[in-house]
Image (tube, grey):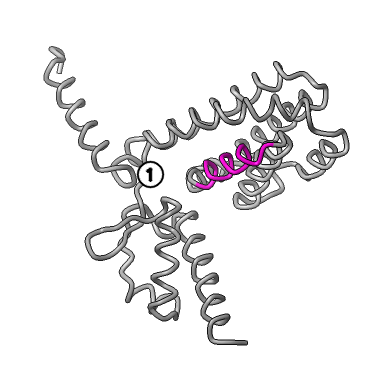
Amino acid sequence: MSATTTGASQTAQLYDRLRAAILSLELPPGQSLAERRLEARFAASRTPVRAALVRLEAEGLVRRDGRSYAVAPIDLAEIAQLAEYRRAVETAAVRLAVQRASDEQLAELADGLGMPAHTHAAGASVRAGGDFHERLAELSGNPFFSAAVATALRRLERTRWLEARSADARDQARDEHLRILSAVRARNADRAEALIVEHIRGTHERLRDALSSSDWRRVHLMPSLIQEESVTDATIHEADPSS
């Protein structure tokens, strides 16, 4: 094995391990990612550490913090924007999938949903859900739709892990996927589109509620949002004659 191949393998392994630590919140939002500490923690040299950080920065999971890096905060505004983006893309894609997907392709998609979601760990559930949405977009026959869905889900992966920690949430997501697929197999474009909209809205609302808890906001969200919340709270308090 050449030195180049070995270096690429080490970079890929480090990227996978670092990404998993961020997604699982072992490395929480705001955590400093000094290169030397990462080298020691993962027994890696500087080059693969730096390459992994650059790749994670492109995915929105880390960001520059002066001359170093830090785990990116979770941004509620971006989550809302991605929900809007997904709704526009996935509704168009599902309507085309109704027209273009073969019965055999839809049967394969059904097989991919596998066992009930409560039997899977959070990571497996997130991957299964992502695979479903990406594959459904692929069945539109337009590769730009599938690429767009994959990009959006990748940006949302950390928050999707949070939702998938709940067995009830995993079951609900799988049930919604099954209903969407049933509408597509029935060649009912209007029904499939409505279910996609409902699914994306429900997922967004569940994430928003979880991430809007006061404890989570103080520790993990964008500092600007916390400051705005503090100003709003102060204003309300001053305006309330009963306080």
Residue 141 covered by magenta stretch: no
Q: Quadrant of the N terminus?
A: bottom right
Secondary element under disc 1, as helix, strand or loop, is loop
Q: In this view, does 92 lie above or below 112?
A: above
Residue at image location 50% in from the left, 73% down from the top? 11
In this rendered view, identify the residue nearer to me: 85 or 4. 4
> Label 1 sits on what residue type?
Ile
Q: How many labels does the image show?
A: 1
Residue at image location 56% in from the left, 82% down from the top? 6
Q: In this view, does 92 lie above or below 131?
A: above
In the figure, is residue 51 to the left or right of 196? left
Please name the residue that numbered disc 1 is placed on.
74
In the figure, is residue 87 to the left or right of 62? right
On the image, which quarter does residue 90 sit in?
top right
Query: Which region is colored magenta?
Result: 142-154
In this rendered view, identify the residue nearer to me: 235 or 184. 184
In this rendered view, identify the residue nearer to me: 30 or 4. 4
Q: Is residue 111 above or below residue 29?
A: above
Q: Quadrant of the C terminus?
A: top left
x then y, percent, for residue 119 = 72, 47
x then y, percent, for residue 42 = 45, 76
x then y, percent, for residue 136 = 70, 37
On the image, which quarter does residue 184 sit in?
top right
In the figure, is residue 169 to the left or right of 215? right
Residue 150 covered by magenta stretch: yes
Label 1: how many residues lie within 10 Å, few (<14), some (14-19) or many (20+)?
A: many
| Residue at the outermost top position | 241
Instruction: Examine the residues drawn in magenta and state their main secondary structure.
Output: helix
In the figure, is residue 200 to the left or right of 129? left
